[in-house]
Image (cartoon, rainbow, N blue to C red):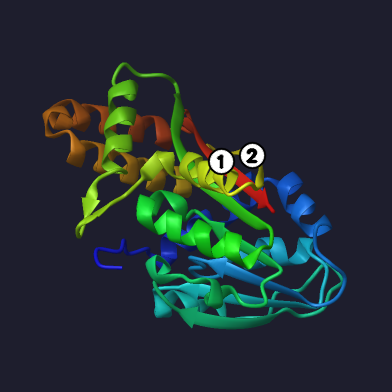
Amino acid sequence: MSGVIDVDADWLALREAEDARARSRELALAAASALAPGQVVVHDLGSGTGSMLRWLGPLLPGPQVWVLHDWNAALLDRALIGDPARDRDGRPISVQIRTRELARLRRADLDGADLVTASALLDVLTAEEIGAVVEACTAAGCPVLISLSVTGDVELDPVEPLDDELRAAFNAHQQRLVGGRRLVGPSGAALAEGLFREAGWSVARATSLWRLGRREPGLLGRWLDGWLDAALEQRADLRRDGVRYRALREAQLRRGALSATVSHADLLASP
């Protein structure tokens, strides 16, 4: 995909524990219950370094084969480092990697899939790319579990007067043009849900929340920097007030007096 967004491996590592806490275990177990006995083949889209595999694999029966799809070969290589993930019965999970662009995903790319998964993906795609993903998944005819799609809802504590404007600016930035690609940002989950329903599929939806605070001060600080940087890039007129806002929030962070709740949506689509 031209204009694809680079993802930093260190950021993925920093957020992995909070991702694991936030994802809907209820939807994951529902996906597990829909699997037929025998070998389970999972195709994971936008796999990055394999965090979905490490979280979901132990909740699913086995034996399992995971096929990891991502455009970034360097991230996929990291998914193969270390001890293999294990299924819920303790058997090692077999992993294959495929470097590919999701805009070109086709039914044949998902041959043999018993389950398709993705995490933190939809908001960095275009409407056309989400359409291609949904079309390939519906053609494959197996359940699809998509987690951690941002919804744009962010609540900071304590509340500050500039919060609403910054939230709106960040959400607009998430829908910007990147290399000729118009990202869907916070509307990604709703768009995918609508497309699955149009195809006659049932969709269960759950809210998955990052709860950032004293437990993860490094993650909260990194998230705050990225959130502010994006918002102020979108709204240059807020930059002067943004300097004061950043200083205030960083002081609160150092004192352990800042927390943030970042909302996501998880979807389980079934034929």
- Camera-side residue of 219 and 71: 71
Circles 1 and 2 in contact, beta carbons < 8 Å: yes
Q: Position of residue 72 (x, y in %)?
A: 39, 74
Provide residue 42's location: percent of width, then percent of height.
67, 70
- Residue placed under numbered mark 2 in the picture: 205
Residue 81 in sight from this viewpoint: no
Residue 265: which disc? 1
Amino acid type of the residue tagged 1 in the rendering: Ala
Q: Quadrant of the C terminus?
A: bottom right
Residue 13: x %, y % from top left: 50, 62
Note whether 113 is above or below 211 in the view shown. Answer: below
Q: Position of residue 180 (x, y in %)?
A: 20, 57
Residue 181 at least partly seen: yes
Q: Can you tell which quarter of the image residue 223 is in? A: top left
User: Which element carries disc 1, helix, strand or loop?
Assistant: strand
- The residue sitting at 35% across, 19% down in the picture is 160
Kindly report the distance in space between the C-alpha atoms of the residues bearing marks 1 and 2.
7 Å
Side of 231 relative to 250 (left or right): left
- 10 Å neighbourhood of mark 2: few (<14), some, or many (≥20)? some
Q: Does 195 appear above or below 91?
A: above
Residue occupying image coordinates x 66% and y 72%: 113
Q: Amino acid at mark 2?
A: Arg
Quarter occupied by the N terminus: bottom left
From the image, state whether disc 1 or disc 2 is nearer to you.
2
